[in-house]
Amino acid sequence: MRPVSRRDALILGGLGLLGTATGAFGLYRQMGTPSGLAPRTGAGFSEPETLRSRGGRLDVRLRASRSRHLLVGREATTLGYNGGVPGPTLRLRPGDRLRIDLVNGLEESTNLHVHGLHVSPEGNGDNVFVEVGPGTSFSYEYRLPDDHPPGLYWYHPHHHGTVADQVFAGLYGAIVVEETEPVPVTRERVLIVSDITLSGSGEVVAPTVMEQMMGREGDLVMVNGQADPVLTARPGERERWRVVNACTSRFLSLRMDGRRIRVLGVDSGRFAEPRPLEGENAVLAPGNRADLLVTAGRGGGDLRTLPYDRGGMPGGMGGMADQMPGGGPMPGDGEPVRLARLDVTGPAGEDLPEAPAAAASRDLRGAEPVRRRRLVFAMGVGGMTRGGDGPGMSFTIDGREFDADRVDQRVGFGTVEEWTIGNDSPMDHPFHLHVWPVQVVRRGGRRVPGEPLWRDVVGIPARGEVTVRVAFDDFGGRTVYHCHILDHEDRGMMGVVRAGR
Ligand code: C2O
Ligand code: CU
Ligand code: CU
């Protein structure tokens, strides 16, 4: 556990008071009562339906609604696209046009964001300022540039204030942009990791105010809506696992024991050579994706996620838990969770050629940025929670909460900028910028050596800072950057950037 500094203790202490003050508001869910619904584990691995582009186009209808269906092998009532969790996987190629008719069958507003895709944020493109009211629909059109980076992306709602609730309840799906020269594998799989808390009757359990401030983590960690499914392969077969962390707040720290597993890349970045699944290459903040290469060995292996200390508030931190009513397990305290099992049986599979080397990626370290900015993520005690259900904490960037009508950063179209993201709080905040991927150039003031490191979600450690460079190419317009702990985003940890000429 991290030591608690005096300043952090002040924030934490404030939160403790706040807990006392708002105990009556159900700040704490009964701790130690895990999900009421016991999951059925060990089912055969399954994937959502795949919809593939043809002749440069893909037209899809996505209907968001609440429905009763099978989740973790049980009957549950969740949100979903087209009646399932996750929604269909969309497979595209660079240069494609994608049209999504989003039909809102919910009782509240929603909208859609294509996370990580490098497409226009304007009009009916990847425009998160669009609001799709209940019972209405909206047609999104996206045109992928011809040189769009291949890789795994995903879609989820982005209507400010309800993003965490809607994602947590089941609204997400994967997008694959294929490469022209695919990595030779026996098979490819998409693994969408998400978490949820379900009551005994299979309803989604709402988080407490405290859990929202921490960033809620569900009791059940699922892969494609299943609990600990079994994948089967033959010895020597090679698989490509495209993993997305669709959890609302949970960081994943992936491990696979005893097997040969390597990382081809994270987000849209691809390493020149596959790397071992360890250290920072194994950590997926909410929103991050990993592209994994798994060679099946006899006996198989388990894919697990280890507890990850993303800092936080009370609970196991310097005895703060004792001062909290009902203070209980906090992120980082838990046990490893098995996500899936690989079962390897049968005669040996055929040998495959090595993965082709990745094309060298762009490096902005040689460019002179036209402008350097500093953004500061912070948390403060005070302010009312949304809905006025009691005092809360404020989640700000540069001291301000999100305002859709304000432009926080004006950047020049076609320019390279350097942004240093500081974190003046005791928790990690994963920084995410829409439309433009970022190159991580310094961490805690230290240069990032070696090949360029591209991400679209970057964890900013508690009391730390990370410097990125961004090339505002291709698209002008207005979009957002925010913390991808979706509860924090909904509470205001988001800003507006406008790229103009
Ligand atoms: Cu994955 Cu602005 O979000
Ligand atoms: Cu995004
Ligand atoms: Cu955050």
Image (tube, rainbow, N blue to C red):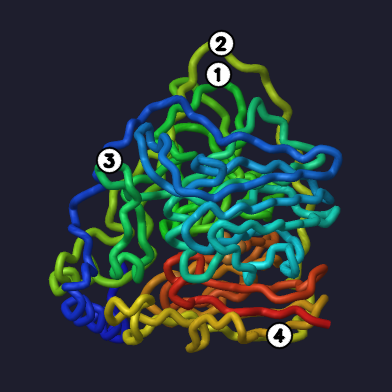
Q: Which residue is mark 3?
A: 37
Q: Which residue is mark 4?
A: 410
Q: Which quadrant, please, contains the N terminus?
A: bottom left
Q: CA distance from mark 3 to mark 2?
A: 38 Å
Sooner in the amino-acid sequence: mark 2 or mark 1:
1
Q: Which residue is mark 1?
A: 234
Kindly identify the amino acid type of the residue bearing the numbered disc 2.
Pro
Can I make out residue 366 in this image? no
Q: Quadrant of residue 129?
A: bottom right
Sooner in the amino-acid sequence: mark 2 or mark 4:
2
Pointers 2 and 1 in contact (CB under 8 A)?
Answer: yes
Q: Secondary structure at mark 2?
A: loop
Image x and y of residue 49, in percent? 60, 34
Q: CA distance from mark 4 to mark 1?
A: 54 Å
Q: Assess disc 1: are there few (<14), some (14-19) or many (≥20) residues with their C-alpha within 10 Å of its C-alpha.
A: many
Sooner in the amino-acid sequence: mark 3 or mark 2:
3
Some atom of ligand 1 lies within 8 Å of the CB belonging to the residue at label 4 = no
Image x and y of residue 72, in percent? 38, 36
Pointers 2 and 4 in contact (CB under 8 A)?
Answer: no
Q: CA distance from mark 3 to mark 1?
A: 34 Å
Kindly identify the amino acid type of the residue bearing the numbered disc 4.
Arg
Q: Secondary structure at mark 1?
A: loop
> Which label was assigned to residue 402?
none
